[in-house]
Image: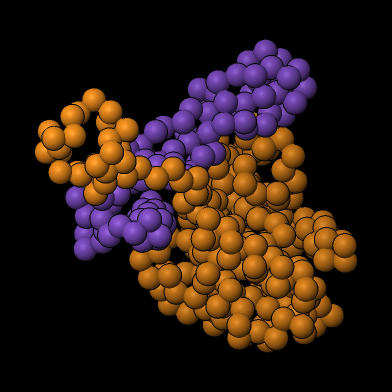
Amino acid sequence: MCIECGCEEATHPAQDHDHSHHHEHGPKTLRIEEDLLSKNNRLAGQNRQMFREQGVFVLNLVSSPGSGKTTLLEKTISALAPAMRIAVLEGDQQTSHDADRIAATGVPVKQINTGAGCHLDAHMVGHGVADFDLAETDVLMIENVGNLVCPASFDLGEHHKIVVLSVTEGEDKPIKYPHMFRAADVLLLNKTDLLPYLDFDLDKCREFARQVNPRIRIFELSCKNGTGFDDWLSWLRQQILI
Amino acid sequence: MHEVGITRNLVEIAEDHARRAGSNRVLSVSVDIGELSGVVAEAVEFCFSAVTQDTMLEGATLLINRIPARMVCEECQHDFAADNLTFSCPACDSFLVQTTQGNELRMTELEVE
């Protein structure tokens, strides 16, 4: 060891000490093991704890734009409220159109505009629910930004991710966007009233969904004519009571 | 393009660790990006220089270690490299498979001045 500076370079003679201590001030390597989503995951954990403490059942609705999430919420709210106290967080890049529709049902709603953002994150949700009285809320429905890619990676602290797929989008969406269908617990196949006018293959869609997620629960329904809606509602009621 | 947000997280985490190590300049940062993480390594590379502008990481080298997906079958315990996203066991065709590798999205090393 060098007696001048304590470095490990034992080979250089003490008088030939012109390495000027670069090694002390030179690059230093730090070993790190930190998830790049650690901040979101930490905040999602805080949200989850808050929801548990307040007894709020939370759903995160994800889908491509136009699958019928807002209509699904309107119909679900009118079936469950006021017996169940529901609050809604609406995520969109712009406008309060969806929040206005939900407000018309009479339940508390808050619009989150993500601007350039393509998904909601745990931080936005934590602040978004600050306007609600969670102690007086049984169910929180979060309508994520319409996008089948990014929201799959962001835990919001929800109990279930519900992916909505409308039959006009094609039966192969589950294998085209496997991350989302793998992250979700429930698949709602919506707009089934349109099936007579489409080439949509229902069996194939179920098969594709189970290929990427064998445990996914599938409901087929039409928010328009109400077909299949009771199965979804009874599952939801059952989950809320657990 | 949630890769921009994720790259911002990367900068935040790196600056935090550098600061704690008494440095204000990061020379290189190494990250593991799994094939199933939902994050496109090329997109992170693409936005890295823009996102790191005016930060301790400006001019830093980004080293991405891509981690391939591996799975194990719940039915026959076969361990296999998942070379596509259909998630089926090549030995018994079951879809009941667990991911054992490929979800990584983490910082592993920092070189600071």
Residue B48 in view = no
* Residue A166 at x, y percent in the picture: 59, 52
B107 shown above or below A190: above
- Numbered label tally: 0
Residue B106 in view = yes
Q: Is residue A38 left or right of residue A228?
A: left
Which residue is at the front of the view, B8 or A87?
B8
User: Color of chain B here?
Assistant: purple
* Residue A241 at x, y percent in the picture: 88, 66
A82 shown above or below B76: below
User: Color of chain A here?
Assistant: orange
The residue under the point 27% across, 35% down is: A2
A129 shown above or below A36: below
The residue under the point 62% across, 53% down is: A163
A3 shown above or below B97: below
Q: Is residue A80 left or right of residue A181?
A: right
* Residue A226 at x, y percent in the picture: 74, 62
In the rendered image, which quarter is residue A5 located in? Answer: top left
The residue under the point 53% across, 60% down is: A40
* Residue A220 at x, y percent in the picture: 72, 50
Which residue is at the front of the view, A41 or B24?
B24
Identify the coloring.
Answer: by chain
The residue under the point 72% across, 43% down is: A216
